[in-house]
Image (cartoon, rainbow, N blue to C red):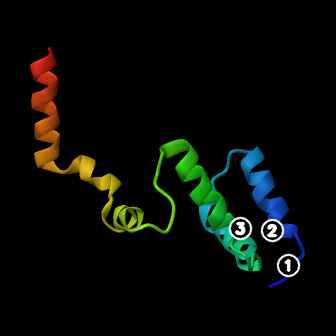
């Protein structure tokens, strides 16, 4: 979908004035992403995740398994929190 660019000015001005407009900003980002037929934005995210977070990339089975079952939210698992807490107390 084509646009006149006016909404880009709106988002830029809102950022400059520190005024949150999340719905409009998200809509602009989705418009830009929809124009990227090669999904370069997704490739960039994968590369950044690997470079900064050490997240596994590649087609092998172990990597595919980690992408499927690995979760950041496990850090909030009560059993895991308790286990980590005991380990910290042992060190103290």
Structural distance between the alpha carbons of marks 3 and 2: 23 Å
How many tags in the picture?
A: 3
Residue at left offset 55%, top offset 43%: 52
Task: Quickly name the residue at label 2.
Answer: 7
Q: Nearer the viewer, mark 3 or mark 2?
A: 3
Residue at left offset 61%, top offset 55%: 47
Q: Nearer the viewer, mark 2 or mark 1?
A: 1
Q: Nearer the viewer, mark 1 or mark 3?
A: 3
Structural distance between the alpha carbons of marks 1 and 3: 21 Å
Q: Position of residue 69 (x, y in %)?
A: 30, 65
Is label 1 in contact with label 3 (beta carbons under 8 Å)? no
Residue at left offset 66%, top offset 59%: 44
19 or 66, nearer to the observer: 66
Task: Quickly name the residue at label 3.
Answer: 40
Residue at left offset 16%, top offset 41%: 81
What secondary structure is marked by label 1? Answer: loop
Task: Quickly name the residue at label 1.
Answer: 3
38 or 35, nearer to the observer: 38
Give neighbour class at mark 3: few <14, some 14-19, many 20+ (Cα, 10 Å).
Answer: few
């Amino acid at each position: 979908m084509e646009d006149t660019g006016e909404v880009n000015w709106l988002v830029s001005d809102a950022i400059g004035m520190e005024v949150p407009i999340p719905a409009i900003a998200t809509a602009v980002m989705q418009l830009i992403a929809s124009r990227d037929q090669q999904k370069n934005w997704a490739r960039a995210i994968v590369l950044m995740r690997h470079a900064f977070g050490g997240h596994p990339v590649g087609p092998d089975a172990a990597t595919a398994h980690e992408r499927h079952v690995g979760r950041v939210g496990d850090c909030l698992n009560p059993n895991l929190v308790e286990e980590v807490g005991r380990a910290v107390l042992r060190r103290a």
